[in-house]
Each structure stands twice: as C-alpha cells, then as structure tokens.
Amino acid sequence: MRNLDSLLNPEAIVLVGASDTGGKAGNTILSNLGNWKGPLFLVNQSLPEINGRKVYREIEDLPDQLDLAIIALGSAKAVEAARKCAQKGFRNLIVIASGFSEIGKEGALLENELRKDVLSKGSRILGPNTLGVFIPGTGIDTIFVEHGDKMFSEPGDVAFLTQSGSVGVESLGAAGVIGWSLRAFVGIGNRIDIGENDLLEYFSRDAKTKCIALYLETFDDAQEFMKRSARITPVKPIVLLMAGKTEMARDAVASHTGKMASVGQVFYGVAKQIGVHLAHHEEELADYSKVLSREPPAVNPRMAIVTCAGGYGIIALDLLSDARYLKRAELSADTVAKIRKIVPSYASLSNPIDLTASADNGMIAHTLECLEDDSQVGIILAFAFFAPSGIDLDLIDILAEHRSKTKKPFIVCVAYGPYTNELAHRLYQKGVVAFTSLSRAMKAMDILAERAIYLGKQQIP
C-alpha cells in the first residue's frame, strides 16, 4: 500500500521521453503535468531543455529513490529505461508503450525482461500498454489522448480502474458530459505487476473514494478478486463491467490483451452473493457508479414519479414493471390531499403524479415536500421538463434544495432539447444525480434497491 500511495500520491515525478514535439506522448504528458506542483524531472537524450525546463540526458544523473517515473518511450527503449529506473531505486514506473505480450511472442519476451530486471529490484510497474493515471485536483495526468479532463477539474468520488484504455477514456467522456465524479482513473494495461486486486485494496481504504468502478476483460486472480470484493462491498459499492462472456468476445479478448478470458458463468452467480453490481455495457458502468457514489441505498423500494408530461409517466410505469426490485408506491390519502391544494383540478395524482403542462416551479417544490412526508414513498423520480411556461431554470435550485433536505434516494430525469446535457451537468454540480434518459434513470434506481437488499437493509412498508 505504501508503494501504491507513492504511485497515486507521489512527491516527485520523472518523465522519461519528455518531448517538445506536438503529438508525441512525451509532449502531451508534459503538457498534462502543467498543474503538478511537485518536483518534475525531465529526461531526453537529445534536448538540453524544454520550454525553459532543464532536461537530464541520462536517468543515471537523477536523484535516487524518486516516487514515480513515467516512461514515454517505445517498447524496447522503455525496457532499458525501466531497468535504469529500477537501479536508481524508483518506487513506481508507469510504462506507457504498447508492443508487449498483446502483440505475441516477441512482445512477451520484452515483458519478461521487465519482470526479471525491474520487479526483482523492488520497483513496481503499472502497465505496460497503459494510459496510466489521472487524478483530478492533483495535476497528475498521464493520459495522452483526449479524455474530457476539463470536465473533471475537481476531485470526485469514483475510482475507475480499467484494463482497456479506449473503453476507459470514452466512458469518462460520455459520463462527464452529464456529470460524473472522478476520484481517480487507473489504466492497468497488461498488468504484469499492479493489477485490479492491489488497486481494489488501495481504494477501499481511501476515504475520498465512495465507489469503485472496473472494466475488466480477464482477472489477474479471480479468487482473490472475489475474496477482496466480499470484504469491501459491505462498506463501499463495487461496479464491474466484465467483457468476454460470449465465445466470440473471448477470442477478441485474447487478441486484445494476449490473455485468454477466464470468466465463465460461475462468476456472475457469485458476484451478486458478494455484493458486486454487474454492468452490461459502459453506459451502465458509468451510471451505476455515479448513482451509488452519491445516493443512499433504497431501503424502501417503493417509487413515486413526478412529471408534467403524462406520456413520460406512462413510460415510467412500463419501465418500473421491468425493474427487478423497484415497486410503485401507493400514495397516502393525506399526501394526495395536500398536493391537490395547489395543482390544477385536472392533474392526475395516482402515481405517476402528472402535474400537466400547467405545472410551475412552485407546484413541483410543493409536491416533492409532500412526498418526503409520505412513509409509503421510499424513492423519488422527478422529471425536469423546461418546456412548460411556468417552469424556468430556477427549478435547478429547487431540485438541489430538495436533494439537500431529503434522506430518500432522489433522481432526476431531465429533458430540454439541445440543452439537455448541459442542464444535467448543472444539476450534478449542484449535488443532484440527473440522467437524460428515463431508462437509464430507472436502471440506476434499481441498483440502489439492489444495494439495499445486499446490505440487508430493505424494508417494504
């Protein structure tokens, strides 16, 4: 754990292969590290300086026992550089390059050299064939492709561990558009040393991490993963997207990672028993980790639906019938009477509560207050439609205020034409978990009910 802390919270960083040429990984990573406040040592055998920064010609000229070396060189040169870093006693190495076991026998030989010459000296390796790490709020960012980093300028709640760099960064980009809270991104790549089990342990102990999300194609040690997960999930949720369930997918995994997929249907049965929430694709991975990091378990799975568009209320009921754990709440007569006082006479209050296109901000606020007081209601879905003339952007603050008061899970489905994503992101910045799709919102709420069942906390009035 001490070594991993120096990987994810280093005091000093070395960039081997720093470059002044745009488009090169060594240049992009150097630019990414622009907000890093600690000591940064650059190594390049051809350049005496880059942008006014001193550049070391040889790794041997650097101080000993530095925390982290990022090696942005081709595979063969990366092995030699890693060997020299290990001889200097550097604690952690991120080997960015591809061209190792994922390409076949020749690359596997290079990978074995890394194991033999680096790990034996006590240095730890992330990778090779990895995008490395990105930790918002620290200035640490080794991802050399577009990854929506501007959307994650503030530190967040979800630790995202991924075996595939492309799946990882695209998931980040898509999730960040509507609001997603990133504590750390770690690409494990070919995983010759640091893998998902080490990182699970680290982030389980990290107070800033509220949820751990993983994309895996193979396990480093499946039994150890299950053992650690079973210990972690009672206190911190884990969401897993495991690729390679079908025979065709398993063949693709072998060509992508150089390893055979080792999942089998057995794991999927065990996962539920140990409290791991399974995602079926990258959208669910992002959505489930988002909602689990911000919302409490649905101890009472009975849902109330608030809308000003009746058609969406009907669709919501259809989706609710397909949910595994959610149920429709029967509103108390007192709740219906209190809502009726300020809504149109033609509003339908049977749940879904359809306030109609005559709704305004005040009606929505009042309805949410009434639902908060109804013991039959355990979880609330509110639609944020901005088309009705009585609804304006002040609704964002109304929804945020309700979120700050309620102890019940509270999810918003937002819709406003081309402004939908922007408003979902604004809601998330205000502390409200919002989705731009009703089906995504319903699945996310179902996961909150699944979490309550696993924890043994679910109580249905």
Image: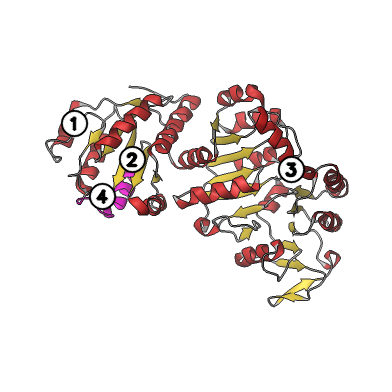
Earlier sequence position, callout 4 versus callout 1: 1
What is the x, y in percent for residue 250? 69, 31
Residue 227 visible in the shown view = no
Earlier sequence position, callout 2 versus callout 4: 4
- Look at 32% across and 26% down and name the residue there: 328
**Residue under pointer 1:** 336
> Magenta stretch containing residue 393, yes or no?
yes
**Residue under pointer 2:** 406
Amino acid residing under circle 3: Arg
Amino acid residing under circle 2: Thr
**Residue under pointer 4:** 387
Give the secondary structure at mark 2.
loop
Number of numbered discs overlaid on the protein picture: 4
Q: Is residue 36 above or below residue 330?
A: below
What is the x, y in percent for residue 188? 69, 45
Marks 4, 3: nearer the viewer: 4
Earlier sequence position, callout 4 versus callout 3: 3
Segment tinted magenta in the rendering = 389-405
Marks 4, 1: nearer the viewer: 4
**Residue under pointer 3:** 191
